[in-house]
Image (tube, rainbow, N blue to C red):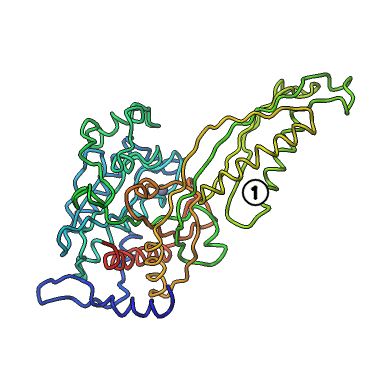
Amino acid sequence: MNRREFLHTTAALPLLGGWPRGGPRRAALPLRANGARVNAALAAFDSVGRTAGGINRVAYSEADLAGRAFTLDLFRQAGLAPRIDAAGNIVARVEGTGRGLAPLVIGSHVDSVTDGGNFDGPLGSFGAIEVARSLREQRVRLRHPLEVVVWQNEEGGTIGSKAWVGTLTPADLDKVARSGVTIREGTGRIGGDASRLAEVVRKRVGPSAGAGQAVAGYLELHIEQGGLLEAAGLPIGVVQGIVGLRWMEVTIRGFANHAGATEMNRRQDAMLAAARFTVAVNEAIRSEPGRQVATVGRLVATPNTTNVIAGEVKLTVDLRDLDAAKIERFRLRFEQLGREIGAATGTAFAYAPLVDSEPALADPRMMEVVESSARALGLTSQRMPSGAGHDAQELARIAPIGMIFVPSVGGISHSPRELTKPGDVANGVDVLLNAVVEADRRLD
Ligand SMILES: [Zn+2]
């Protein structure tokens, strides 16, 4: 957005808002949420599921149930009427002034990993509740209905959001969650009903979907979980998308032979080939600008013995980027490197795909509304990819999505040391609030 468009946007914003008693409300912009309320809720939530190892609100556990009860209370304190949908998500809806519009959806999750922290999920969940509460208290009504959603079991595979998109399979439901019950059983335990999942499926806005079945747009506030914002001294990250991921297993076959009796120039050393390949992958991925990453993270040598040249090595490559074409290009490059190194070392490389997930891109309008909201609040921001998965990546299949990142102290997450400072929490909620108002104006 250029300066002129931005001025136009900010000039238009005060005309927003609904038509409560006394006529249309002209909200003073930017709006401010009550950040202290969100920080207080996060502080109180810190004792729910806290053990010596960290936060343990693993989906369907007693602590998860306690966390959901705490969250349901917050919804009610905010004047919202939450219900549990068939997928086990907590959902509350505020009607808009427009006719026949699909809802804007905001939210996150409150389940955690094992020995995790208190901000991954709860920040965006409590922030979304606060946004609905601030809009009501400040008598700002949106055109679109607003739905606040706390997705179930994000950490175990974005289960609740997959249910909305309709990609949750019977095999997914039969998987045993970390708390020991199947996802099907767990969904029942939290008040859902896995036999009625068809009820929650939403479709892309269009002729095939009525407003009741669609999502106009999805916004999620989340901690960054990396160290970029803190290192750059930036309060807000504008997420460009959730990176796609390719996992490959590479098997390198050489010849196991005596480590003392075999001359150096007569070896087919799979370990040496693996070492060269590991370095080559690193050099290749760094050889061009961009945020692409590649990691050789696991390596198993056979026979894995001190006095035998390795006859075989199996290793894994983890490759990620926002651009699916770039991922494919690097995958082919890595195969080519294997052929070259194999020829030079007398070994053979074979590749097997393990996991393949497509990038989920943020909608350009959503990135703009987050940026202009941050700017209106006097907060600097930067566009960045999300290296971690989120419920937003599922919603991206059916709706324009956007995400707001706030700094993680030390870039640490999925750890009891996970922390986002109160001022950053408040900034993130303020940006979400204004982004919702702006998205309400811009989206159909
Ligand atoms: Zn999360």
Residue type indicated by callout 1: Ile
Choose top left, top right, bottom left or bottom right for residue 141: bottom left
Is ligand 1 within 8 Å of the beta carbon of the residue shown at mark 1? no
Q: Residue at x 88, y 28 (%)?
A: 264
User: From the viewer's perspective, is 296 left or right of 155?
Assistant: right
User: From the viewer's perspective, is 440 left or right of 363?
Assistant: left
Q: Position of residue 257 (x, y in %)?
A: 81, 19
Residue sitting nearer the eye, 31 or 329: 329
Quadrant placement of the N terminus: bottom left
The residue singled out by tag 1 in the image is 285
Q: Residues within 10 Å of mark 1 (few under 14, many from 20)?
A: some
Residue sitting nearer the eye, 161 or 361: 361
Q: Position of residue 243 (x, y in %)?
A: 49, 49
Q: Residue furthest left?
A: 21
Q: Residue furthest front?
A: 207
Q: Is residue 370 above or below residue 159?
A: below
